[in-house]
Amino acid sequence: MKARGGTLVIACGALAREIAALRRANQWDGIDVRCLPAELHNRPERIAPAVRAEIQAQRAHYSQIFVAYGDCGTGGHLDAVLREEGAERLPGAHCYEFFATPDVFAALAEAEPGTFYLTDFLLKNFERFVIRPLGLDRHPELRGEYFRNYKRLVYLAQVEKPDSIARARAIAQDFGFSFEYRLTGYGQLGTRLQALAATTKATPWPA
């Protein structure tokens, strides 16, 4: 059995690539990551129980556990679980907020409430998480009904790639939205994991 020590990040699968990139770039060897399926976002009532189960399964092996989720539509249930289990999570309601930072996201939302947001993950998996679950591949005529209150698409990019910008712009045009691009980088995901890594390095974990 693994000796108790180090830090575990229990993360949404939608953040797997970003967390892996941060770990490689910063050589955060003291942080382990376990990702839950990104598909849980389609059933947010399952997020809190899944996070609780993972915390309880891993608690004996780690000195600290951090949860890389926002509230993500759980209506406060995730926070209730984390209070009971003694763990913390990323700030904010969702990844759009912690990537953009709360002040920037609040300004975006206030400027145009009818905004559809994309991250690098959602852009890459647009068919998987938007088109197919909504049935738009079979019934494209429903697009106007689903999105009739949306006016703008904002692409919150973690990594700058011209082809990704072009693809996001094409989606906006296809749906009849105006388009805005923001290069956020990793936002509060990066700063919070940096703080965790510093704590992990400063603590003499058992061998």
Image (spheres, helix red, strand yellow):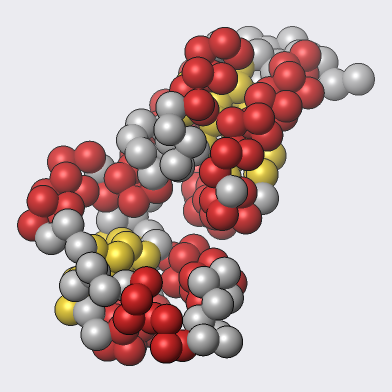
* Left or right of 178, for residue 49: right
Q: Quadrant of residue 46?
A: top right
Q: Residue furthest left?
A: 111
Task: Please tell me which residue is depicted at 73% across the width and 27% down the height of the picture.
Answer: 53
Work out which quarter of the rendered image holds the C terminus and state it. top right
Tell me if residue 118 comes above or below residue 36 in the rendering: below
* Percent of width and height locating residue 123: 44, 71
* Percent of width and height locating residue 40: 61, 49
* Percent of width and height locating residue 98: 33, 42
Tell me if residue 153 comes above or below residue 143 in the rendering: above
Q: How many marks?
A: 0
Task: Please tell me which residue is depicted at 27% across the width and 50% down the height of the picture.
Answer: 100
Is residue 13 visible in this depiction of the protein? no
Q: Quadrant of residue 138?
A: bottom right
* Left or right of 165, for residue 142: right
* Percent of width and height locating residue 181: 23, 70
* Left or right of 114, for residue 165: right
Task: Please tell me which residue is depicted at 19% across the width and 72% down the height of the picture.
Answer: 151
Work out which quarter of the rendered image holds the N terminus and state it. top right
Tell me if residue 65 comes above or below residue 33 in the rendering: above
Viewer-side residue, 140 vs 115? 140
Task: Please tell me which residue is depicted at 59% across the width and 31% down the height of the picture.
Answer: 48
* Left or right of 191, for residue 89: right
Is residue 8 visible in this depiction of the protein? yes
